[in-house]
Amino acid sequence: MTSAHPTESAGSGESRGPDGSREAGSSTALGFDLGKLLAERGAERYELHTRHLNHQLPRMLHTIGFDKVYERAEGAYFWDTDGQDYLDMLAGFGVMGLGRHHPVVRKALHDVLDASLADLVRFDCQPLPGLLAERLLAHVPHLDRVFFGNSGAEAVETALKFARYATGRPRVLYCTHAFHGLTTGSLSVNGEDGFRSGFEPLLPDTPIDLGDLAALERELGRGDVAALIIEPVQGKGVHAAPPGFLRAAQNLLRRHKALLIADEVQTGLGRTGDFFAYQHEEGVEPDLVCVAKSLSGGYVPVGATLGKDWIFKKVYSSMDRVLVHSASFGANAQAMAAGLATLAVMEDEEITANARLTGDLLRSRLAELVDRYELLHDVRGRGLMIGIEFGRPTSLGLRSRWAMLQAARKGLFAQMVVVPLLQRHRILTQVSGDHLEVIKLIPPLIIGEREVDRFVGAFTQVMDDAHSGGGLIWDFGRTLVKQAVALR
């Protein structure tokens, strides 16, 4: 005999109906209230990080005046405790391609949680991973299968493993100044010594200069190369592969029976004005493509490695090898639902086209300033991935100040620009890499003319101040010099 009243699941603190289903309005788990916890302890954020996490992060943020307290975010903006808005031109290192809290992605996550799916059973086949794979592969007709992991680094690790196994060769080529991740395998193809130092020995991989076909052919001639992994536009410094290089490299790789891996973790999903950045060059068809960052709309860690059928079938060659490469949280329902919603938004709102048009507008407006400011040397990039490079000025007064900064540490001038953009104009940006005088702009792909006007106006004011020979920007520069010298 069943009771007419709802039952309570043992230990769960929630009401269930006679059939075991959750009832609307059931209580939250006893003993935990997220809102209350944040209200009581949120002010301790920097102290908690200092005590329990990476202690250098709050120290660095305090040093450059970035230790803000952001209360909420939406679209391309944050708001602080005083209600002031901040324009986000960083997008969480590219994760927030749709901006923050897109309503379609939010709803998809609510829906998938409310559906109470039998997720991560592992010995079944849920529909959402297959549906997301189908949608992704529709953008790359020459590829056939997808492996879902949890991050860009994991997508790269997958590609490296698959390339080595499929070819039977040990070595992967990569480009100097590349960034493919910080796990041990991806670090082996990371082109920056600063990240690699102290973590050797790594895998037997070999760097070549971006665009150097002769070096590529020389290394391939040794007969032990599994693949070349490349960012079509490098995140560090925002350098695109030279025109024709990807196609020529692909031809060389195929001649030597090696694979082409396109790392589209940051450049993919519309960032450069095409769905994938390699698609800017006709005839390029990578064997493996790495995807992550904005695939889930910024909500759930996700990574994907897209590849050719024969590669997957070689790795998963028998039932004995069905779990030879897997991820505990890979293809989880929340990530898959968010990914499907993200791709739907990209299509419905023409996100890729907006990135192309708005990126062209922003880049052209900034390029017009190169002749106006002697400290500004170059503006480059594709779509909404833009590099602003500074260099040695010509006038005597500015040259002496520039020399002072360079003697202390290369990259300080770019940091001098980033700081007033945030502190005085409430715009968040980043220096493109250590020891680089380059600012990288990777804003949400939803920005438009209003955000372009705001950034260009603020950047112009900072450049005016820098070229005046005095002002707050050079006062801050002297502070940075003292700190850089003290750290030696």
Image (cartoon, grey):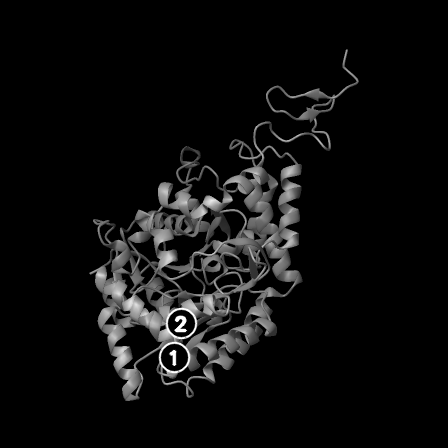
Q: Evaluate if marks 2 and 1 touch, with contact meaning CB atoms under 8 Å apart.
A: yes
Residue type at numbered disc 2: Val
Density class for disc 2 (Cα within 10 Å; few <14, some 14-19, many ≥20) is many
Left or right placement of residue 438 versus residue 22 in this view: left
In what element is the residue under mark 1? helix
Q: Residue furthest right?
A: 4
Relative placement, left or right, of 2 versus 436 is: right
Residue 466 disc label: 1
Image x and y of residue 442, in percent: 48, 65
Q: Dot 1, how many residues are within 10 Å of its Cα: few (below 14), some (14-19), or many (20+)?
A: many
Compare residues 451 and 397 and report the one nearer the observer. Answer: 397
Q: Does dot 2 land on a helix, a strand or a loop? A: helix
Image coords of residue 87 (percent x, y) = 54, 65
Image x and y of residue 115, in percent: 66, 37
Q: Quadrant of residue 86?
A: bottom right
Q: CA distance from mark 2 to mark 1?
A: 8 Å
Q: Is residue 445 visible?
A: yes
Q: Residue at x 53, y 34 (%)?
A: 120
Amino acid at the residue labelled 1: Ala
Residue at x 25% of width, y 75% of height? 404
